[in-house]
Image (cartoon, helix red, strand yellow):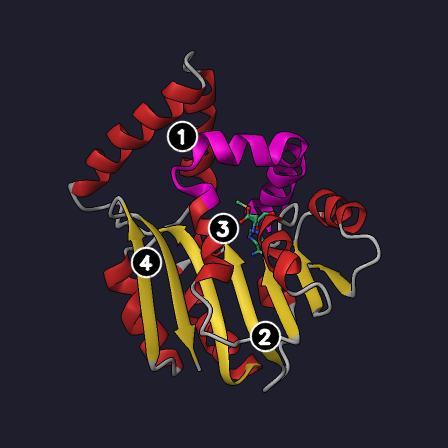
């Protein structure tokens, strides 16, 4: 619970300058956000969408541009993030849940689309696998799971390459090292990424058949998985 509470504190604080920090610290952030819409099957129009770890709403904002009439459910453990979404999306058909993934009651065959942007890497491996199953069950047949994250195995030598490339990117945007140092503290304390090679079989085990990854620079990945 200690880690869970400090994760909430961390994201309450992170919410203040969230989008700018993400744009300047996460390579391909805008491209990956766009993928939630650009990779959808042709003619697909989700009526009901669940956004897991919505943050300040950047994934939902993409979808709302194209599907303003859809009904959204936004879930996040951080109240500050949820409040930002409430202000940002006033007037849209949205319900909010300030809760942890593990405490949320997913209902079966409910959603046309479930989305998760840079949120599931905060979960432990076993929780990720459980969540993929819950997400699969909560989707309607033909429903889409859209999922973007840093996907890497921290124990493999390529992790060092990622860190070098990532640091280069961040220092271009924040030339003094303060932001990079903060980012690495956050990464060490709260992030538990897995490689795409690890995640793909877990998604298959959950039931997903049609799984398509879109990979940028090896580790920055959008995955579309269809029920
Ligand atoms: C890096 S932000 C991503 C926000 C947004 N989806 C995006 O793509 O920019 C991760 C969000 O997930 C939330 N989060 C992380 N772990 C969570 C958990 N176990 N339950 C609920 N929310 C969680 C955090 O509070 C944070 O707002």
Q: What is the tally of numbered marks visible in this picture?
A: 4
Using the rendered image of the protein, determine whether residue 100 is visible from the camera's viewpoint.
no
Q: Is residue 135 visible?
A: yes
- Mark 3 vs mark 2: give the one in front: 2
Q: To which quarter of the image does residue 107 belong?
A: bottom right
Q: Which residue is mark 4?
A: 214
Point out the image quarter for the C terminus.
bottom left
The tag earlier along the polypeptide, 4 or 3, is 3
Q: Secondary structure at mark 3?
A: helix
| Residue that label 1 marks | 184
* Residue 22 lies in the magenta-colored region: yes
Image location (x, y in percent) of residue 138: 57, 80
The CA distance from mark 3 to mark 1 is 22 Å
Task: Residue 59: give x, y in percent of width and height.
Answer: 57, 53
For label 3, being within 8 Å of ligand 1 is answered yes
Taking the view exactly as shown, the residue that stands out farthest to the top is 176
User: How far is disc 4 from disc 3 in space, using C-alphas?
Assistant: 12 Å
Residue displayed at 66% across by 74% down: 48
Identify the residue shown where x is 58% and y is 78%. 112
Residue tagged 3: 33
Q: Which one is closest to the eye, mark 3 or mark 1?
A: 3
Q: Secondary structure at mark 1?
A: helix
Magenta segment boundaries in residue numbering: 1-30
Answer whether residue 125 is magenta in the image: no
């Amino acid at each position: 619970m200690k880690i869970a509470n400090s994760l909430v504190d961390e994201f309450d604080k992170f919410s203040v300058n969230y989008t700018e920090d993400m744009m300047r610290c996460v390579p391909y952030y805008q491209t990956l956000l766009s993928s939630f819409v650009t990779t959808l099957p042709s003619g697909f129009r989700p009526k009901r969408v669940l956004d897991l770890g919505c943050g300040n709403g950047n994934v939902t904002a993409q979808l709302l541009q194209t599907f303003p009439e859809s009904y959204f459910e936004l879930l996040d453990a951080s109240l500050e993030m949820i409040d930002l979404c409430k202000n940002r999306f006033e007037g849209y058909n949205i319900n909010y849940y300030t809760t942890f993934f593990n405490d949320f009651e997913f209902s079966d065959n409910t959603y046309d689309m479930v989305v998760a942007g840079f949120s599931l890497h905060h979960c432990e491996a076993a929780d990720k696998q459980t969540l993929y199953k819950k997400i699969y069950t909560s989707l309607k047949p033909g429903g889409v799971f859209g999922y973007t994250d840093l996907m890497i195995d921290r124990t493999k030598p390529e992790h060092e390459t990622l860190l070098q490339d990532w640091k280069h990117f961040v220092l271009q945007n924040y030339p003094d090292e303060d932001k990079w140092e903060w980012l690495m503290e956050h990464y060490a304390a709260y992030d538990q990424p897995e490689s795409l090679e690890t995640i793909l079989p877990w998604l298959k085990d959950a039931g997903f058949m049609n799984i398509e990854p879109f990979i940028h620079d090896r580790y920055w990945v959008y995955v579309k998985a269809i029920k």
